[in-house]
């Protein structure tokens, strides 16, 4: 059998493309078979929303052998895992933030920003009530400059 159509001499790509897309959809769109929780919430520091940062959920041994590590961007003080959240169990959480006002570009074109606060680490049970986890980074995380 040939990949070329006998009439046009062109590759018979349509069938191949459809088959490839079907496989990609089966593997990439929630096909991991895990029950994930759509965790969302806010991140604040010194009473203000963290404008630019990240929240990272790392599974502990209590979650089991197969559990996702979840990294979510924090923008304007909010994050939302949607359908790609963590599974049920205990997680180590790390929250970080950047001080974008201190952004500097060096002579090589590399951008540098200062941390807004020291990484804040704690543990949490997933799912939280109403799938909402609001984080107030404590004042103890202030970085002395």
Image: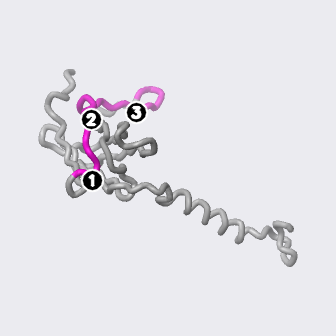
Q: CA distance from mark 2 to mark 3?
A: 12 Å
**Residue at x 13%, y 37% (from the top left corner):** 46
Q: SS for tag 2?
A: strand
Confirm whether the magenta stretch covers residue 101: no
Q: Neighbour class for label 1 at 10 Å: few (<14), some, many (≥20)?
A: some
Q: CA distance from mark 3 to mark 1?
A: 29 Å
Kindly identify which numbered label has been placed on residue 111. Answer: 3
Confirm whether the magenta stretch covers residue 117: yes
Placement of 71 over or under 129, stated as above or below: above
First along the sequence among labels 3 and 1: 1
Judged by depth in the image, the label closer to the viewer, 2 or 3, is 2
Which quadrant of the figure contains the N terminus?
Answer: bottom right
Placement of 139 over or under 89, stated as above or below: above
Q: SS for tag 1?
A: strand
Determine contact: label 3, label 1, CB under 8 Å.
no
Kindly identify which numbered label has been placed on residue 51. Answer: none
Q: Which residue is mark 2?
A: 99
Looking at the rendering, the stretch of residues picked out in magenta corresponds to: 106-128
Judged by depth in the image, the label closer to the viewer, 1 or 2, is 1
Q: Neighbour class for label 3 at 10 Å: few (<14), some, many (≥20)?
A: few
Q: State the residue lying farthest toward the bottom.
A: 7
Kindly identify which numbered label has been placed on residue 40. Answer: 1
First along the sequence among labels 1 and 2: 1
């Amino acid at each position: 059998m040939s990949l070329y159509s006998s009439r046009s001499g062109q590759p018979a790509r349509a069938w191949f493309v459809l088959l490839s897309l079907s496989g990609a959809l089966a593997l990439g769109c929630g096909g991991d078979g895990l029950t994930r929780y759509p965790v969302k919430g806010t991140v604040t520091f010194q009473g203000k929303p963290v404008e630019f940062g990240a929240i990272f959920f790392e599974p502990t041994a209590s979650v089991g052998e197969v559990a996702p590590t979840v990294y979510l961007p924090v923008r304007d003080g909010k994050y939302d895992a949607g359908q790609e959240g963590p599974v049920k169990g205990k997680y180590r959480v790390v929250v970080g933030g950047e001080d974008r006002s201190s952004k500097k570009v060096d002579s090589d074109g590399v951008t540098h920003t200062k941390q807004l606060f020291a990484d804040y680490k704690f543990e949490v049970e997933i799912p939280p009530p109403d799938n909402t986890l609001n984080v107030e980074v404590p004042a103890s995380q202030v970085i002395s400059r």
